[in-house]
Amino acid sequence: MTVRNVLVTGATGFIGSRLVPALLQAGHRVRCLVRRPDAHLPEGAEPVVGDLLEPAGLERALAGIDTAYYLVHSMGGGRAGFERRDREAAEHFVAAAGRAALRRAIYLGGLGETGGGLSGHLASRREVAEILRSGPFATTFLRAAVIIGAGGASYEIIRSMVERLPVMITPRWVSTRCQPIAVGDVIRYLAGCLADERTAGETFDIGGPEILSYREMMERFGRIAGRQPFIVPVPVLTPKLSSYWVGLVTPVKPSISMPLIEGLKNEVVCRDDRIRSLIPFPLTTFDRAVEIALAEGKESA
């Protein structure tokens, strides 16, 4: 195995906090871009304080780095203007990475980022991918749908709705098809791309072994968690309107939950499975992913 000097942006987030230990365990040298000097990181990780929206500190973070993981978004900073913030962060990264002679970037975005009629969230994710691919380095673009894991925004929305709403009046998006994936499988793919040079410069869809509607996901979650939600779809409730009442019952910030809910009109299903032959491993079922996430949630409570 080739040991790499790796930078992880978003290192303390839902994905980054799981990826950093996996990279360290694999023997790589890991630097983490964090906003706070007191950020909690695993032993062995090198912290560098900086912000992708403040380009002045990025050259130090990227100095000597072979591969960088781009795991950030700007929705947590407020609903208004997150598309502009996402664009500026990606542009700052590309400029600094070009000066630092970065060799590779690995970006985790979302499925459903093709065609017209995209939600603001999915359109912004697609724009970030295009900006990264314009840089003088090879960008690997992984596209995932709903990621099942404790602390993930989409998972926490589903969990909160099932646990707090015995009766749900929902829009037609409950019938939209989705291909959820366990967070542990996402980490395997992200780490696997670093190890396999055949993934450099490529775009891959990643998903779990099942295609489910959002209604099926909520009903199956309910069975596992000992709940039986009664779901009533109505044609007059739009995704935008439903995002308001979802925001009232979930712990996820409205600046994050509302764009996600509005994007549920877009089908998010893998269109190719090429990555399965490059990075093969048994995929985690939806039910097992929920069981793991529920156990993690109890441990952190």
Image (cartoon, grey):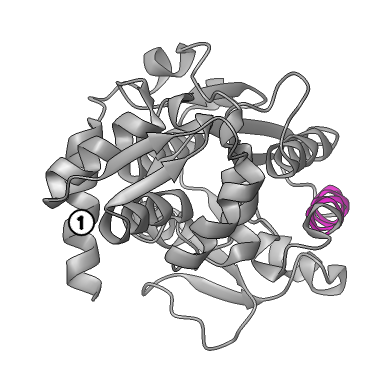
Residue 272 lies, with reference to residue 100, above or below; the image says above
What are the residue bounds of the magenta stretch? Answer: 85-98
Give the quarter of the image for residue 96.
bottom right
SS at mark 1 in the image: helix
Query: Which residue is located at x 38 percent, y 23 percent?
Result: 279
Q: Is residue 241 left or right of residue 224?
A: right
Q: Is residue 34 left or right of residue 54?
A: left
Q: Position of residue 46 (x, y in %)?
A: 52, 72
Q: Is residue 7 visible?
A: no
Which residue in the structure is indicated by mark 1?
A: 294
Query: Which of the two residues, 149 or 251, is positioned nearer the viewer here?
Result: 251
Query: Which of the two residues, 295 or 215, is positioned nearer the viewer here?
Result: 215
Q: Which quadrant is home to the N terminus?
A: top left
The stretch drawn in magenta includes residue 291: no
Query: Which residue is located at x 17 percent, y 39 percent?
Result: 288
Q: Is residue 29 left or right of residue 282?
A: right
Q: Position of residue 247 (x, y in %)?
A: 53, 62
Query: Which residue is located at x 61 percent, y 41 percent?
Result: 239
Residue 74 lies, with reference to residue 121, above or below; the image says below
Q: Which quadrant is home to the C terminus?
A: bottom left
Q: Position of residue 133 (x, y in %)?
A: 78, 33
Neighbours of disc 1 within 10 Å: few (<14), some (14-19), many (20+): some
Residue furthest bottom as drawn: 38
Query: Which residue is located at x 78 percent, y 67 percent?
Result: 58
Q: Position of residue 104 (x, y in %)?
A: 67, 39
The stretch drawn in magenta includes residue 88: yes
| Amino acid marked by disc 1 | Leu
Give the quarter of the image for residue 50.
bottom right
Judged by its main secondary structure, the magenta piece is helix
Residue 251 lies, with reference to residue 275, above or below; the image says below
Residue 268 lies, with reference to residue 4, above or below; the image says above
